[in-house]
Image (cartoon, rainbow, N blue to C red):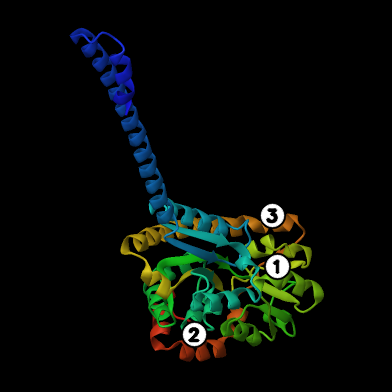
Amino acid sequence: MYLRKSWPIIASMPLTRRSFLAATSASLTVFSRSLRGQDRAASANASASLDEAAATRQRSREVEFAFRQYHNQTAASSLHMRLVQMWEAVYKESDGRLVCKVFPQNNNIQGSDPAALKALVGGDIQFFTLMGGILGTVMPVAEVQQVPFAFRSAAHAHRAMDGPLGAYLVEQMAAKGIHGFRTGAFDNGMREITAHKRISTPADLAGLKMRVPAGQLVADTFKAFGCEPVVVNSDSIYAALEDGRADAQENPLTLADQFKLYEVVKYVAMTDHMWSGFNLLAHLPTWQTLPADLQAIIDRNVTKHVKLQRQDQIAANARLRTALAARGLEFNTPDPAPFRKQLAGVYAAWKEKLGPKCWRLLEDSVGKIQA
């Protein structure tokens, strides 16, 4: 087209060989420049298309797996902090293929832990942390984590959960549609009694309305001390102590701090009567859909961040005695022997309920269990 427009100009001039070559050369030069411009534009368009395609592929990779993680602690807790860090690391190491949003206090789900457990088993959420006692409502052997006075310390319990006893619990979870992690027991800590009155002996507990979580073994333990167990979810403990539904509750000091129980109780008995952890659980069918490389990334980060959170929690529970005393709580440390003596019936009943294998693995881990 460009050459046809040039021909009239050439025809109006004397047509010499020199003028013809000059005109033709100029036209071809312009034509060549046009082609180069079109090539550059086409190349730019192709590059933009490739960039957009790459971005689309990247966006697709980022949403390949999108999950939710629930837990019952506050956003200020070490559990929340380490879970957030854990899933951020998984996101980065998976090149954006897997994302998981962490919701503190179970995203305020009505029914708290029991409702969240039901949601996990049903696949409505994909990851959840839960104490063994409440897990025991669907898998009774998980109650072994709550055997009173079985563990001398949180570190003692961690060794048991990371060993053959913990492996046995993970095996049992699969039958209930739950995937457990071999080193997936985050720490809650040793449980202490906070109350409206001073607790020094089992007789001081007689007749008290004791707030307990869902789970039979905790309730049985406090019935043996003469209490009336009252099941209240963790998000309502403050209200229950304030309005008189409960006279006392038992939990690690971190819960008393996070939920500001120092505003509604006066006394803390450092009984160390029981350990509890936060077992990391996954919806088994969801876990089974993950490629092996993503499972490995999650497993590696679970191990890393469980270790870090345990260190956080042990340190926090240790320093909080001083901090809570400064807020007005009065502490005492009862002799555990009289409490253990009242548990002979509990030990006998739960040795049978948990079964010989589970009880043997417990005693292999912690020594002979006796009143």
Q: Earlier in the sequence, mark 3 or mark 1?
A: 1
Q: Residue at x 59, y 78 (%)?
A: 114
Q: Is residue 209 left or right of residue 221?
A: right
The amino acid sitting under disc 1 is: Val
Give how far across and how far down residue 190 sits, in percent.
Answer: 57, 68
The residue nearer to you, when weighing 221 against 255, is 255
Q: Earlier in the sequence, mark 3 or mark 2?
A: 2
The residue nearer to you, when weighing 5 against 72, is 5
Q: Residue furthest left?
A: 17
Label 1: how many Cα within 10 Å (few below 14, some 14–19, many 20+): many
Name the residue beneath numbered marker 3. Answer: 323
Q: Residue at x 80, y 77 (%)?
A: 244
The amino acid sitting under disc 2 is: Pro
- The answer for how far apart the CA atoms under marks 3 and 1 are is 13 Å
Name the residue beneath numbered marker 1. Answer: 268
As helix, strand or loop, the secondary structure at mark 3 comes to helix
Name the residue beneath numbered marker 2. Answer: 140
